[in-house]
């Protein structure tokens, strides 16, 4: 009889304890002591005591409604960036940026053309010799379509009364049989020259975004 009572008591205790494993994932688990009121936070699957009531809280709650818009924040501070120098002529024409002096000629970068232009300090125009423009020909007498030396890719240059720039293409290998080079008096001379696979560039006439020649003196801001 005593043995039966012990066995039944053991089974009852096991059922009583196992009945209080009552938590899901993603929760904070605890027990509230019904008589004294203490709260005990426990790991998942910790058994309840007979004097406790199980409690649980969701770690991530449901999405609440959107709150009202907050007031505008303060204005961001101004960044003290270095100012890019602008180049103007005496008639207040904006010529470009980044002035630099080379061999007595002033170079200015023209953003609209993505090219540099060299201006003579004597007349405010592009000198016929500076930059020195060499033209290359497949013909042996400087006839036919001319091509440009690759050193002129990023410059504006002048031939006659017109202004030109190299095309934005890869250099083309050509068999060159003559070249034309400038003279200090403004003329040009043809020279026979044979070379194969010479990298050269085609070029086109351009309209400058200001009137030439520019009025001197120049000033910067």
Image (tube, helix red, strand yellow):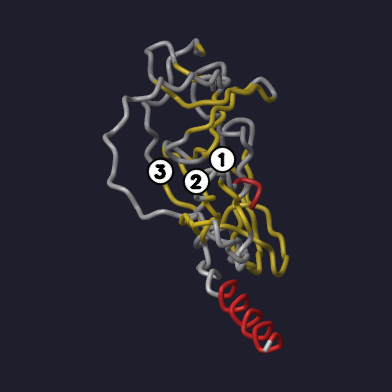
Q: Earlier in the sequence, mark 1 or mark 2?
A: 1
User: Of the numbered discs in the image, which one, if any, rests on residue 146?
Assistant: none
Q: How many marks?
A: 3
Quadrant position of residue 50: bottom right
Q: Is residue 73 left or right of residue 190?
A: left
Per the image, the residue denoted by label 3 is 206
Q: Is residue 5 left or right of residue 60?
A: right
Q: What separation in Å lies between label 1 and label 2 (alpha carbons)?
A: 6 Å
Q: What separation in Å lies between label 3 and label 1 (alpha carbons)?
A: 12 Å
Q: What separation in Å lies between label 2 and label 3 (alpha carbons)?
A: 7 Å
Element type where label 2 sits in the image: strand
Element type where label 3 sits in the image: strand
Where, quadrant-wise, is the N terminus in this rendering? bottom right
Where is residue 51 drawn, in percent x and y?
55, 57
Whether label 3 touches label 1, CB < 8 Å: no
Mark 2 residue crowding within 10 angstroms, few (<14) / some (14–19) / many (20+):
many
Whether label 2 touches label 3, CB < 8 Å: yes
As rendered, which of 27 and 171 lies closer to the eye?
Answer: 27
Whether label 1 touches label 2, CB < 8 Å: yes
Identified at 60% across, 52% down, the residue is 41
Where is residue 195 drawn, in percent x and y?
73, 65
As rendered, which of 40 and 15 lies closer to the eye?
Answer: 15
Mark 1 residue crowding within 10 angstroms, few (<14) / some (14–19) / many (20+):
many
Per the image, the residue denoted by label 2 is 165
Per the image, the residue denoted by label 1 is 155
As rendered, which of 187 and 34 lies closer to the eye?
Answer: 34
Q: Is residue 21 above or below residue 179?
A: below
Q: Is residue 210 above or below residue 36?
A: above
């Amino acid at each position: 009889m005593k043995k039966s009572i012990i066995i039944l008591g053991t089974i009852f205790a096991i059922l009583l304890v196992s009945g209080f494993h009552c938590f899901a994932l993603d929760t904070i688990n605890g027990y509230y002591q019904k008589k004294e009121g203490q709260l005990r936070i426990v790991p998942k699957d910790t058994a309840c005591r007979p004097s406790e009531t199980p409690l649980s809280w969701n770690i991530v709650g449901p999405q609440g409604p959107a709150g009202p818009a907050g007031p505008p924040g303060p204005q961001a501070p101004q960044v003290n960036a270095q100012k890019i120098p602008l180049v103007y002529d005496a008639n207040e024409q904006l010529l470009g940026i980044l002035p630099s002096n080379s061999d007595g000629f002033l170079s200015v970068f023209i953003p609209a053309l993505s090219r540099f232009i060299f201006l003579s300090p004597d007349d405010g125009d592009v000198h016929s010799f500076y930059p020195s423009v060499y033209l290359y020909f497949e013909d042996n007498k400087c006839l036919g379509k001319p091509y440009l030396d690759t050193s002129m890719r990023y410059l504006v240059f002048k031939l006659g009364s017109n202004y030109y720039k190299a095309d934005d293409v890869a250099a083309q290998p050509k068999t060159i049989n003559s070249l034309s080079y400038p003279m200090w008096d403004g003329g040009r001379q043809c020279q026979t020259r044979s070379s194969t696979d010479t990298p050269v560039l085609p070029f086109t006439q351009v309209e400058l975004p200001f009137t030439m020649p520019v009025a001197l003196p120049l000033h910067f801001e």
